Image: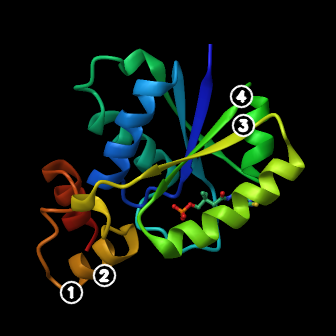
Amino acid sequence: MTIGVYPGSFDPFTLGHRDILLRSLKILDKVIVAIGINHEKDNMFSVEERINIITNEINDIDNISNVEIKPFKGLIIDFASEMKATVLIKGVRGPVDYDYELQMAGMNSVMNPNIETIFLISKPEYSFISSSLVKQIANMGGNISKFVSPRIEESIKEKI
Ligand code: PNS
């Protein structure tokens, strides 16, 4: 059984995140969505809220039993190894993500050569979506309906 870990802040979980998760489920037996706990970041949603939000976002998919959602602290490579995962999944939207992710994939592979990073290239319609920009647009009264689900749009509106 091949287990993958899909790490991120997911604050909020966007349509792009959902697409990467669904695509990774086609190539892996199980995917753990790993929510990084970073107290320095000014998050809109608590970790518990993000777990609930992501659970609701994927409750319509067929292979739901192949997904787990867990928070993690510290190095992702250590969390992956604790979870017996052998794959790290990263969504790459463009050259900026690629440069950063390439460096992390390289360092992670030195720290643990048994864990492979796979890059899934974002679909063009999602390649510009960023959680930070979604929050900025929402905070300034803009329309975020093309970037997140209607349910998440509501949750964001409740926060601002
Ligand atoms: O969605 P984000 O904010 O880009 O996700 C950030 C996250 C949680 C994926 C990132 O902060 C992370 O991987 N943290 C773990 C720390 C780590 O392993 N650092 C070493 C990388 S070589």
Characterize the local packing of mark 1: few (<14), some (14-19) or many (20 or more) Cα atoms within 10 angstroms: few
Q: Are marks 2 and 1 in contact (CB under 8 Å)?
A: yes
Q: Secondary structure at mark 4?
A: loop
- Circle 3 residue: 80
Q: Residue 117: name its quadrant.
A: top right
Q: Residue at x 49, y 73 (%)?
A: 95
Q: Secondary structure at mark 1?
A: loop
- Circle 2 residue: 136
Nearest-to-viewer mark from 3 and 1: 3
Characterize the local packing of mark 4: few (<14), some (14-19) or many (20 or more) Cα atoms within 10 angstroms: few
Kindly tell me whether mark 4's CB lies below 8 Å from ligand 1: no
Nearest-to-viewer mark from 1 and 4: 4
Question: Ligand 1 appears in which quadrant?
Answer: bottom right
Q: Are marks 4 and 3 in contact (CB under 8 Å)?
A: yes
Q: Is residue 86 above or below residue 1?
A: below
Q: Secondary structure at mark 2?
A: helix
- Circle 4 residue: 83
Q: Residue at x 31, y 67 (%)?
A: 129
Q: What is the CA distance from the residue labelled 4 to the residue labelled 3?
A: 5 Å
- Circle 1 residue: 140
Q: Are marks 2 and 3 in contact (CB under 8 Å)?
A: no
Q: Residue 34: name its quadrant.
A: top right
Which residue type does callout 2 highlight? Gln
Q: Is residue 135 above or below residue 61?
A: below
Mark closer to the chain start, 2 or 3: 3
Q: Residue 2: give x, y in percent of width and height.
A: 62, 20
